[in-house]
Amino acid sequence: MSLTKREKECLDVIRRYIYENRLPPTIQNICDELGLKSKNAGFKILTQLENKGYIKRNRFISRGIELVERVEKIGIPIVGKITAGVPITAEENIEGYLSLDQFIGDKDNYFALRVIGDSMVDKGILDGDLAVIRKQNEIFPNQIGAFMINGEFTLKTFKVDKDGRFYLKPENASYRPIYISDLDQFEVKGVLKAIIRSYGEHNETRKY
Amino acid sequence: MSLTKREKECLDVIRRYIYENRLPPTIQNICDELGLKSKNAGFKILTQLENKGYIKRNRFISRGIELVERVEKIGIPIVGKITAGVPITAEENIEGYLSLDQFIGDKDNYFALRVIGDSMVDKGILDGDLAVIRKQNEIFPNQIGAFMINGEFTLKTFKVDKDGRFYLKPENASYRPIYISDLDQFEVKGVLKAIIRSYGEHNETRKY
DNA sequence: TATTTAGGTGAACATTTGTTCAGTAGGTGA
DNA sequence: TCACCTACTGAACAAATGTTCACCTAAATA
């Protein structure tokens, strides 16, 4: 069932509140955020969201709101295709959200990136993996990081050769290192902090 | 600073409440669990836990309790060394906890396993990775699973050869497949659902 | 012995919270 | 035109919530 504009706004408020406070909002909190003067207005929207299956409510406890959607939506943003020039965590780049409480404390400094291609397989990073990146503009040699080079976004190992030249090393023998010259537009976007890989359903018929 | 018995009990109650309800408890909730008749008793314990740095409190909102410890403790258990014969998720096997809200709903059916060795590197599973396993006693061919064979716990790909014989395939050319005979004590413990790898700190000196 | 500390009870309180009832106003479709 | 929906306001209320004050008790400590 589809959401009205107001219901969607309400859902966003709930998501954001949980993200920021690590616990669900009260009805009053929601009303404040939506600019509603009567708690009843918020109460009704919640009931609608519940009926449409977007939230679950525990009527016996305060703040008893639970998002039915995968809680991925509450955590750090998963960046899909990166649009060059646009800030990484801009809305249009976000594929979903990942909740990894390990990173509690400075969640804002993280984002996740869907790995495309096999250029890092030798380090056990496969196509489709989720790379959790901590935003930073500097990086140590031999660290794996996320880089923007000539408008392209990429995950590689940062290296410095004996002559002090920088290059990005794909961890796959069939790819060549990318040397960075002064002519290149180059930017360190962050450093790899974790890899998360999900295994889906089986593809066979008989179970044992 | 160390905890008194009661403080530790209180902390456990908070952890469990969050785990079960996905939001922090009220003071009353805590008192109920601890068998306290006066909210003041719980209030005081919370203040002590706060002073000792085990929780943070937001005094402006209800349920404003936040665990300071890594929230890893609230999620699914991370199994370290497995003691043969002992249930996998028995206390002595548990290395820590992992919070991965992706698995919300049936968290109880998951555990995480620290990967030891390089027997699965060809599938991008490295030494030290965390393998998230869903408990089940059956598995499809070609799925990666956790198995107990002759008292040893292992993560391998489950295979059936053309003659219908079962074997566990290490994903590393230097290891040999393990055929399962009727003489072997063999058990399927679960199926691999995710791999999580954390990257620690740098090991270089100069940052760029 | 006197005092501190952990661990309570019990009552009181101002707010917050969830909820219900009774309305209002604009827009849409029959 | 009428009914209906979305989207509110406003008032009321019982219960829950966080907090404070006064006081109790057993065990450890000075």
Image: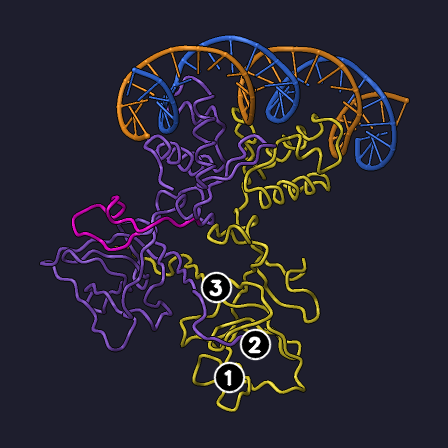
Chain colours: A yellow, B purple, C blue, D orange
Q: Which residues are magenta?
A: B79-99
Residue A27, quarter of picture: top right
Residue B147, quarter of picture: bottom left
> What element does badge 2 sit on?
loop
Is A55 situated above or below B160? above
Q: Residues within 10 Å of mark 2 (few under 14, many from 20)?
A: few
Residue found at x 63% / y 75%: A187
Is B85 situated above or below A190? above
Q: Are marks 1 and 2 in contact (CB under 8 Å)?
A: yes
Quadrant of the image containing the N terminus of chain A: top right
Q: Residues within 10 Å of mark 3 (few under 14, many from 20)?
A: many
B21 and B169: which is toward the camera:
B21
In the rendering, at what x and y percent does residue D10 appear?
Answer: 79, 20
Instruction: Check residue A9 for magenta coloring.
Output: no
- Residue B208, numbered label: 2
Please state which of the two labelled residues, at mark 2 or mark 3, is closer to the viewer: 2
Q: Chain of mark 2?
A: B
- For the residues beneath circles 3 and 1, the answer to whether they share a chain is yes
> What element does badge 1 sit on?
strand
Report how many numbered discs are placed on residues in the image: 3
- Residue A193, numbered label: 3
The amino acid type of the residue labelled 1 equals Val
